[in-house]
Image (spheres, helix red, strand yellow):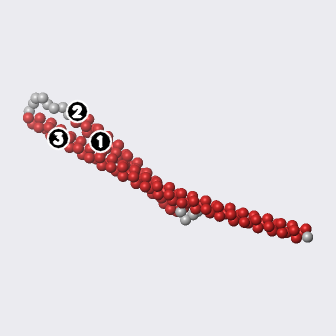
Amino acid sequence: MKTRFTSLVHVKKNIMQKSERVLQQANINLKKAQKALEESLAYLQNISLPSHGKIAQLLANRTLMDAQRAIIQHNQEWLEYTKHEVQEAKEQLKKDMIEYEKYKYLEYEEIQKALKELKIQEARDLDEVALMTYTNKNKEAS
């Protein structure tokens, strides 16, 4: 049964589904950020410090470690950003779900109201038919 809320329910459902997709993508980005941070930390652990050799080799190794620390810092910032992105997506999904449920409830209430009115009309029609049948039987009996 169509009501004035039916099209709104469909629109709100589509918006909610879009928010779900955004949340899924945000979770994927979060997992990628976590993996990148873990990999960069593991790579830093694998860098060994030379105990002897030329100063150029020591400086090159130190530069490599500094670059790796910068990558780790970048990955930590990316991880924080994606956590914030996931949180915002969750909040938006929650709002969209509330809106969807609200209009779904309004549609349900309007359908119930229409069904109640239909039952009342059917009862009136049945009463009218019963009254006409009773009147016709009384005319025939007289």
| CB within 8 Å, label 3 to label 2 | no
- Under mark 1, the amino acid is Ala
Q: Residue furthest left?
A: 55
Pick whichever of labels 1 and 2 is earlier in the sequence: 1
Quadrant of the snapshot with the N terminus: bottom right
Q: Which mark is residue 66?
A: 3
Q: Residue 36 has which mark?
A: 1
For residue 130, what is the image quadrant?
A: bottom right
Ranked by sequence position, the earlier of labels 3 and 2 is 2
Image label count: 3
Toward the top, the furthest residue is 51
Depth order, front residue of 64/142: 142
Percent x, y of residue 58: 11, 35
Tell me: residue 79, above or below residue 141. Answer: above
Residue sitting at 66 percent across and 63 percent down?
118
Position in image of residue 72 (x %, y %): 24, 42
**Label 2: which secondary element:** helix
The answer to whether residue 59 is visible is yes
Q: Secondary structure at mark 3?
A: helix
